[in-house]
Structures are given as C-alpha cells and as structure tokens.
Image: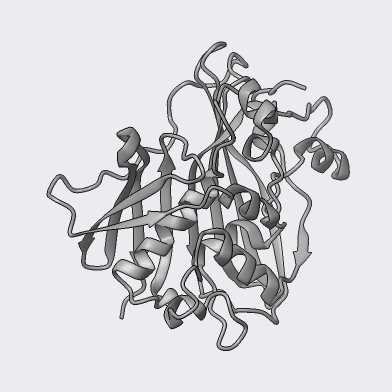
Amino acid sequence: MPIYYPDILEQKNPPRTFAYTDKDVMLYALGIGMGADPMDEKELAFVYEKGLKVVPTAATVLMSGGGRPNRQAAAAAMPPPREGWRPSQMNFLMVVDGERKVELHKPLPPLGATFTAQGGTIGAYDKGKDKGAVIVNETVWTDEAGEKVATITGSTFARGDGGFGGPSEGAPEPHVVPTRKPDRSLDIQTRPDQALLYRLNGDRNPLHSDPESARRSGFPRPILHGLCTYGITCRAVLAGVLDYDAERILSHQARFSAPVFPGDLITVDLWVDGDVISFEARVKDRNATVIKGGKTVLRAG
C-alpha cells in the first residue's frame, strides 16, 4: 500500500493504555550496553531491581515493546476521519530511523504507573520517486490524571516510498552543534550480538538480525537499530556529564546519519553549555558520523 497525501496527515493510532514492568526497564538498559561491568554500581542501578532507575530514552520502547506501529492495522481499528480517506503504509523493509526526540514532562517512574498513548502522523515530505520520503510521527503519553508525561517525536526515512506528491521542503531543521573542540568524548564499545539483544525490546525488523534481509535492503550485514544508537548517546550523556542522574534530562534528540554495525566502537563527542548538551557520535574505524545534531536539554537544578 502506498503513501497517500494529504490523507496520511490524518492518520492516527488508536489510544493505547499500558504499563511497563521492571523487566522492560532493565532489558532496555541492557540493550544499550549498560551493566557490562557488574561492579559498576552507577550503571547497575539501571539493570537491577534494587533502587531501579529508568534511562530517559527508554520511552521509545516502553509503550509497545519497541515494535514499529502497524499503521494499516491501526487505521482499520479506527473509524476513517472522513469519507474517501485512504490509509497509507510504508515498505518497512526499506525503512530506517531518521530522527528521534523524547521530551519528558515529568521523570519516568521505574514501575507502578499506567499511561495512555495517542499518536499519529504530523508530517510527510517527499524527496522524489527514487530518493524516498521522510515521515514524522508524534506520540503523547498521559497519566491517569490526564497530565502529559512524555512526547515522543520521530521521523523515519522510507527509502522505497518517494514520489507520492507531498511537499519536499519544510521538515524540522537539525540542531547545530558548536564548532569548538568537544568538551568531552566517550568511547562506547558495542557488542557483535547487540542487535539480537536490543530487538527483544520489540523491534523485530529482520534488517537487524537476518543477513539475507540486510543484503536485500542494501547492507552487507545486519545493522544496529537506530534507536539503540540513540540510547547509547543518552547513556554517554548520563555517564559523561550527569553522573547518571537520569531525572535531570528534560529532552533528548538526535538525527541518524549513518548505520552502525554491531561490534563498532562508537565515540560520542559532547559539548556542554549550561543546561544544553550538544552531541554527535562517530565510528572512527570507518570515518563515519552516525549521529548528527544531537541535543539534550536539562531540567533546571
């Protein structure tokens, strides 16, 4: 099923009420590599139920186990917004993450809370028939009192879905990092099996696990989930700037610029300017910048 414009801008997911468990919180932290040193008590706090903390970027997976929403099924589950409206569906074998932002209106509790999530498509940009499309989605969590808890905004690059007739300009502009030398740089080693672990958060796209599917998608081997790399950059901010005080993070956003292969050594460069931390991530061995325009905003304090 192709993308229909402007119909896709009215495409919503049905409201979903959910709660997560300590297992979900710990699995996410393990999936981004935390807890590799069992004697590191600061990282242990994210992977052990005693005094459990939540990595802020876990909001990207805790709602639905990290799986990509099935927009065709979601559209079928809701009444059409108007007569003649057409549901859109991307070719998910050709989809990669483009950008993600998590804004936490209040810190995430480790467990024991129930939330309702409502989301939908808020932007669609056509790069051309052979150049793909950028689709922007937003999901808002509210708590049992109806108060906002989190807003998750994400774009996906649909490499096989260009040429649908939407606008080519107007997508959000990326954050510009400082031009000075980074204030800090951290090296984070990924594991060869990291994508196989991270996918247990819910994103079972075979691009990250099956060599043949990866080759069909144009990669020599399975790649790491973009959201795993995104979580690794949040881990770098926690370790390099915040002494693992997760509640200080108000928002964390990044743009995905190149794939990471499981086993890559990722270098995260950090620039600290008051309550704004800019960051980029690179794989030095391949001279590849894999995350651009990263920005973390801290709560006052």
The image quadrant that residue 183 belongs to is bottom left
Q: Position of residue 245 (x, y in %)?
A: 40, 78
* Quadrant location of the N terminus in the rendered image: top right
Identified at 77% across, 56% down, the residue is: 15
The image quadrant that residue 300 belongs to is bottom left
Identified at 13% across, 50% down, the residue is: 181
Q: Nearer the viewer, residue 275 or 282?
A: 282
Vertical order, 73 against 168 (above or below): below
Vertical order, 206 against 281 (above or below): above
Q: Nearer the viewer, residue 223 or 85?
A: 223
**Extreme residue in the bottom direction:** 50
Q: Position of residue 126 (x, y in %)?
A: 53, 21
Q: Nearer the viewer, residue 255 or 260?
A: 260
Q: Position of residue 58 (x, y in %)?
A: 57, 63
Vertical order, 51 against 61 (above or below): below
**Extreme residue in the left direction:** 180
* Quadrant location of the C terminus in the rendered image: bottom left
Q: Nearer the viewer, residue 266 or 278?
A: 266
Identified at 87% across, 44% down, the residue is: 77
In the visual, does 5 lie left or right of 150?
A: right
Vertical order, 275 against 283 (above or below): below
Can residue 129 be spotted in the picture?
yes
Count of marks placed on residues:
0
In the visual, does 258 lie left or right of 123?
A: left
Q: Position of residue 265 (x, y in %)?
A: 38, 48
In the visual, does 50 lie left or right of 169?
A: right
- Colour mapping: one colour
Can residue 150 be spotted in the picture?
no
